Amino acid sequence: MIVFDLAFIRIKQVIRSKEFYFYVIGFPLFFMILFGFISRSWAPAVTTLDIGLYTADNPIVDPITDEMLAMGNLFTSVLSDYKSESGIKIFSTISYAELEKMDTDIRNLVIYGGVEIPSDFSSQASNMTRYYASLILIQQLTAEFENYPSETVNISNAINQLSVYLNSSANLVLNFHGDVTLQDTMQSYTYLWQIMSEFISNHSIIHANSIWTILQQNYSFSFDLNLTSDISSSSSVSFDVQLVSSSTGDAIEDFQREFYSKLLPGNIISTILLSSVSAIWILDQENKTGLLKRLKLTKLSSVQYLGSILLAWSTIAILQGIFMLTFAAMLGFISFSLNPLVWLMMIATMALLGIISATIALIIGSFIQARIAAPILILFGSTLHMFVAEFFITIKPIFSFAGKNFSWLDATPFRSAFLVMKNGIMLESSSEITGLLFDFLLLVIWTIVLFVIGAIIFNKYKLKYAEKE
Amino acid sequence: MGTVVECKNLTKKFGDFQAIDNVSFTVEEGELFTLLGPNGAGKTTIVKILTGQLSATSGRAEVLGVNISEILKSDMKYKLSYVPQEHLVWDDLTVQENVSLMGKLYGLKKVELQKKVSKMIENFGLKGHEKKRADKLSGGMKRKLSIIMALMNDPLLLFLDEPTTGLDVHARTLLMEDLKRLKNAGTTIILTTHLMEEAEALSSRVLIINKGKIVSMGTVEELIQSYVGEKVLQVGLTKDSDDFERFLKTKKKENAELDYIRIKDTFFVKSDEITRLMDEIMKIEAIMGDIMEMNIKKGGLKESFLFMTRELYDNSTVIVETKESEEK
């Protein structure tokens, strides 16, 4: 059969072209590997920056100032308003009434971490800030002995009163729940340490000011103090942000599965589309050298000529697709154990994509020279699939039909091919395979329509051209 | 079959440009018919019309008994073949793949195909290069490959458009031997060339064409006899060619049989008294001092062609007619 012979020759021509390996295989493969591996450090929360807050804190009454202290609430508001040096809010906080719910959301990567404020937070924070406040005040009052000799008795009494609090101890602990393997979780953990330190420092000054007001009332000092933060480590008080590990493995796996189910079909579409460049080159060469005209004197019919092109590029497409899928499976992006029916449907999809790809080559090649058409197709082929896979933007559906939503993306045959492959990769059980049929049928219709258009155009503008002029 | 090609008043215009003008000729079975003319004469246009690649503006042509407008629809198209000026091969296929594919395109069956491919490759001296890709072949080998591919259908009529263009002397000589072999095997060949030696060595008949019009047509011997005769004097001067031309003009007035053409400082002179003319020139010291070379040559197609297409080289107007029209 001359169609098979000619198709085989064309496959040989493509395989022998260095450009094929570089642009058609190398290019999409590079992006598949690049995005595939980068995605492993991605999580959906990266873009949301949500953090959970759970507080079990019990407010207390300060023994010196008699003020009600709800340190847990104060800390959560600091956390919510905390900004980076460039003035951008770092966290978007979500309050949780139940700790379990927060942990569930962490595991599902709804949030990338959660702060648990324990019940003694106010008590411990109050002890700690009182300790530092007393320390600050004692240091400053001691410095005033020489300046105000007439008030030494009052200063001594005040220092004695404050010294009592230096004997108290505090151990302020904050729990941070999250997956230690996630970079952003650990980044948040680091931020928490910084926020905690600033929080204690600021509240120590506030506390010192409150105590100083009371001391003024009791001892009527003739001087005033300039209270500044000077927190130093101490064996009697300490704070800690404890990390409570929470695994997000399943969620990440789901996320990556979803990600790869978009990435792979996109890459396969890209690689098959790019192969139309080689079709354009070969057809252009046949036209330029006069081979196309020469073929008109042989027993090869136009139908056989077109058939050989479609057969060749659908075979090439299948080889490309299988190569990409195998490579992806070897890299762990998909499982080898896909349902055989899904494999079959995906191979058929690739073959149809190959026909579409060759048809595009016939149409474009009928009007434009290869040296112009090739870069256009490379640009088109390497970007279009990103839109089809909705990598950048989600397109709103325009209408629904047969239980399926349609958007303007469905105006390209690649969308249905993409959906068959994406849903095939995501398929949970064999019974769901019927869900792929609608898009597959749509792809078949697209292929037939495009092929007819392509054949008419090529026959009119290229084969006729070859025949006459 | 007898007449293989018959053209009557064939004309082709590209816009205002008249590529061929009222061309009529016939080619008989087994002939190697040469279309000889300078570049742009219209040779390739005639070949393209006769192979169905171009349509004629007016006139009529039949190839293998089929009107040329119907040839692509007729089974007779399988019995003609052509080799254009460009190398008509698939560059990224090997020699064997190219030849095999062309055989398959003509419906040859496996056993027959294998035999024929081997035989053709061997006959044309490409044995040992079967696995070489076409783009790795030399110009001569590539041309041979084109010709082999064109012969895979055992054509009754083969068109060869400037087959030796771009080939070195060695490759050209080898190819001419191949063409002689084809001619002797009985293949009817229509060859276009602008090389006189090629036409002289190979042709059964030659059609000389210039600016789309037939200048002359006949066998090589007939053309030589008609335009230059048996001998021609070639004179090459270093300078003062005008003096020599004045001398020739004077002689021409005295002898109506004398004619010449001048190409820069070289003169080709034909006369019924060529030896006497040479003696006379040798006696004129003023001219002899400027002569670089002077010899009597056997009249050939090259000299005939120069006389036929003299308007390209000098201002003298020559009314040229075909042998056929002369006879009328």
Image: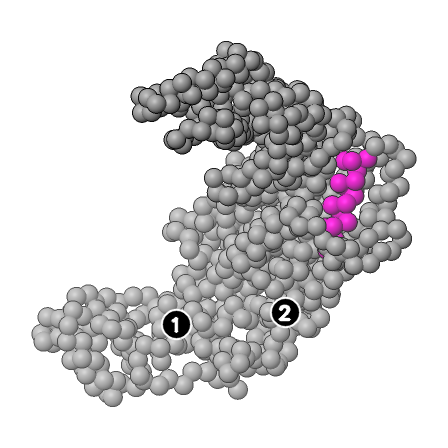
Name above or below for residue A147 compared with residue A276: above
Residue B154, position in %: x, y? 65, 53
Quarter of image, res A334: top right
Q: Quadrant of the C terminus of chain A?
A: bottom right
Q: Main secondary structure of the magenta part?
A: helix
Q: Residue at x 77, y 35 (%)?
A: A425
Q: Residue furthest bottom?
A: B253
Q: Chain of mark 2?
A: A
Res A199 seen here: yes
**Residue drawn 42% across and 82% down?**
B320
For mark 1, name the chain: B
User: In the image, is A453 to the left or to the right of A132?
Assistant: right
Residue A439 picture location, percent across and down: 82, 48
In the rendered image, residue B167, in percent from the top left (x then y), is placed at 42, 53
- Tag 1: amino acid: Phe
Residue in the foreground of this view, choosing between B69 and B229: B69
Q: Which residues are magenta?
A: A412-427
- Foreground residue, A123 or A226? A226
Between the C-alphas of marks 2 and 1, the distance is: 33 Å
Q: Which residue is mark 2?
A: A468
Report whether A289 appears left or right of B271: right
- How many residues crowd mark 2 within 10 Å: few (<14), some (14–19), many (20+)? some
SS at badge 1: helix
Q: Quadrant of residue B201?
A: bottom left
Q: Is residue A425 magenta?
A: yes
Location of mark 1 (residue)? B305
Say whether mark 1 and mark 2 are on the same chain: no
Per the image, label 2 sits on a secondary structure element best described as helix
Circle 2: residue type: Lys
* Residue at x 15% of width, y 72% of height: B239
- Colour mapping: one colour
